[in-house]
């Protein structure tokens, strides 16, 4: 199995500093997956590693939330020999699957996200595909940094990481006056 943390480090995708995560928490570490996934050879290695985790499942497609999940869904789907779809933001705070990406009722899919923290983003992609009659059978991530995210289906990641996160009011980096970077 590929050492993904090493790949993040080697490609400069593991950032250190003071970050405002999408969850609203602060952290001294951030994983910038797009920096890693811009390298097709590494993206493919990640896709194969993710594919291995789900090779026993019967699947029709893989879906990921745009933009971050597009490449990941593609490389995972290639490894699994199924279609690659993505969901994109709609105007109501949810996600939709655009016309032209076919979903047949009853199809079974794997939903993927690069780093699962709260799982909100992949959750919206799941609802978009299920809204078209497909069924989510598993969720996959490169890195699980969640507090036991629960999607109601099996959830597997290549690696699990526990980076420190802080509530803004208890953040030692804020206390030291380090500038906060939104990611
Ligand atoms: Zn802070």
Image (cartoon, grey):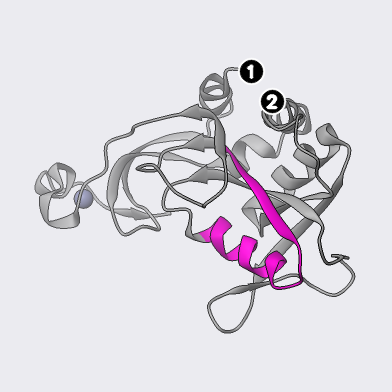
Q: Which corner quadrant of the image does residue 65 belong to?
A: bottom right
Q: Earlier in the sequence, mark 2 or mark 1?
A: 1
Nearer to us in this view, 94 or 5: 94
| Residue at disc 2, secondary structure | helix
Compared across the picture, whether 5 is left or right of 19 comes to right
Could you tell me how many numbered marks the image carries? Answer: 2
Residue 34 lies in the magenta-colored region? no
Q: Quadrant of the C terminus?
A: bottom left
**Quick check: marks 2 and 1 in contact, CB under 8 Å?**
yes
User: Which residue carries the number 1 mark?
Assistant: 2
Q: Position of residue 120 (x, y in %)?
A: 48, 60
Nearer to us in this view, 38 or 93: 93
**Dot 1: few (<14), some (14–19), or many (≥20) neighbours within 10 Å?**
some
Q: Position of residue 106 (x, y in %)?
A: 81, 61
User: Which residue carries the number 2 mark?
Assistant: 49
In the image, what residue occupies the spot 42% across and 53% down? 118
As drawn, 119 above or below 162: below
Q: Position of residue 180 (x, y in %)?
A: 28, 53
Question: Which residue of the protein is positioned furthest toward the bottom in this rendering?
Answer: 92
Q: Which corner quadrant of the image does residue 28 belong to?
A: top left
**Dot 2: few (<14), some (14–19), or many (≥20) neighbours within 10 Å?**
many
Nearer to us in this view, 108 or 88: 108
Q: Quadrant of the N terminus?
A: top right
As drawn, 132 above or below 174: below
Q: CA distance from mark 2 to mark 1?
A: 7 Å
Compared across the picture, whether 8 is left or right of 20 comes to right
| Numbered range of the magenta stretch | 121-141
Residue 122 lies in the magenta-colored region? yes
In the image, what residue occupies the spot 63% across and 52% down? 68
Q: Position of residue 61 (x, y in %)?
A: 81, 50
């Amino acid at each position: 199995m590929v050492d993904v943390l090493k790949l993040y480090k080697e490609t400069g995708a593991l950032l250190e500093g003071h970050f405002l995560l999408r969850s609203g928490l602060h952290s001294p570490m951030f994983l910038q997956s797009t920096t890693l996934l811009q390298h097709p050879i590494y993206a493919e290695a990640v896709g194969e590693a993710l594919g291995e985790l789900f090779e026993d499942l019967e699947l029709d497609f893989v879906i990921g939330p745009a933009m971050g999940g597009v490449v990941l869904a593609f490389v995972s789907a290639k490894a699994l020999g199924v279609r690659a779809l993505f969901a994109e933001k709609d105007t109501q705070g949810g996600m939709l699957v655009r016309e032209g990406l076919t979903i047949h009722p009853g199809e079974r899919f794997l939903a993927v996200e690069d780093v699962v923290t709260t799982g909100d983003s992949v959750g919206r992609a799941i609802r978009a595909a299920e809204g078209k009659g497909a069924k989510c059978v598993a969720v996959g991530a490169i890195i699980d940094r969640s507090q036991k995210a629960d999607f109601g289906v099996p959830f597997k990641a290549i690696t699990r990481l526990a980076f420190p996160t802080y509530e803004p009011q208890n953040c030692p980096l804020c206390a030291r006056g380090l500038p906060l970077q939104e990611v």
